[in-house]
Amino acid sequence: MRENKNMSKKKSLLGMSAILRTRRICVYIILIILTFLCLFPIWTLLVNMTRNNGQIATSFSFWFGNSFFENMKNVFSDDHLPVLSALGNSVVVSVFGSLLCVYFSALTAYAIEVYQFKGREIIFKFILVIMMIPTTISGVGLARMLTNMGQSDMLWPLIIPSIASPVTFFYMKQYMESVLPLEMIEAARIDGAGEFRIFNQMALPIIKPALAVQLIFAFVSNWNNFFIPALLISDNQKKTLPLIIAAVKASDPSSFDMGKVYALIGFAIIPLVIVYLFLSKFIVAGTTEGSVKG
């Protein structure tokens, strides 16, 4: 009787083990498929950067060609494509726009989270309502206003509006609720620290992971921004990289070069990869560090 119970227990354990193994295999298969779907467009871009227009138009290949340097030469030798000036414009807009966006969003979230004042909840809900408004709706009015003010073909109208980012503010507010100790703020005030010093030297180090994440998102958003620059910028020397890429894609079909397009897109992605690699270590390190060490 006892042996029968032991045998049935072993069979049940073996059955559960087989079920878990089957589920694990299914999960791995799904993850492999999702990984392939994510990496396939990137691999296709890298491969087509090394192939010429004729090869891309006539056949598909999983392996690299030998036209990479020719494609890059075509990109930088085209007098109608100021790629280097567009790169500089994109860097200026993205760097300053993302820094202003993250800093002032964190500052606003800090004020809403730490200070107790009348109308605090109303302001918070109002910002959430603004978050629901599509950028395209407000962008058209902004572009018309700036054009009437004679401020088109300038870079600052692409940077300053980045300060107002309800999505970044909301993320910072939620993150501060979970990690920011209000007792530490009160203790710093008792010790005579000013509000900006508390925010810059105590609050910001604590929310470093959130800052790094939002810097990546803000940088990518500013870097890929096409809609607002397309409404405001017509001067070739003030255009950003998305506008240059769009100009290549909209060029004369008789002179259209897919190799050049892929090379330009790949060139435009490089700064995004550098920013991610630079900030990713702060995301990991920030989860184990804070402004207070015991």
Image (spheres, helix red, strand yellow):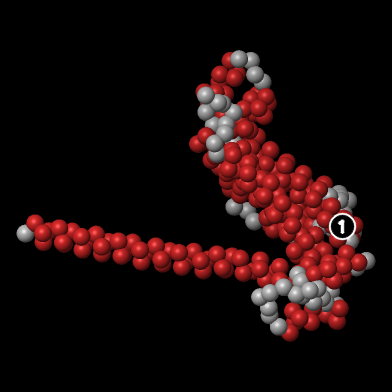
Residue furthest out toward the right = 79
Which residue is at 90% across, 68% downward?
Answer: 78
Question: In the rendered view, does 74 fall on the left or right side of 13?
Answer: right
Answer few, some or many: residues within 10 Å of disc 1's Cα (few below 14, many 20 plus, some between 14 and 19).
Answer: few
Q: Percent from the top left, x then y, of residue 45?
A: 70, 69
| Quadrant assignment for the N terminus | bottom left
Question: In the rendered view, does 266 fall on the left or right side of 122?
Answer: right
Question: In the rendered view, does 105 fall on the left or right side of 26?
Answer: right
Residue with the mark numbered 1: 84
Q: Percent from the top left, x then y, of residue 183?
A: 52, 23
Q: Is residue 163 visible?
A: no
Pick whichever, 224 or 233, lies toward us: 224
Which residue is at 68% across, 78% downward?
Answer: 61
Residue 266 quadrant: bottom right
Pick whichever, 71 or 169, lies toward us: 71
Q: Is residue 78 visible?
A: yes
Residue furthest out toward the left = 1
Q: Percent from the top left, x then y, of residue 229?
A: 79, 57
Question: In the rendered view, does 230 fall on the left or right side of 282?
Answer: right
Which residue is at 62% across, 32% downward?
Answer: 205
Q: For the image shown, how many numbered marks are present on the structure? A: 1
Q: Percent from the top left, x then y, of residue 76?
A: 88, 64
Query: Helix or strand or loop: what does disc 1 sit on?
Result: helix
Residue type highlighted by circle 1: Leu
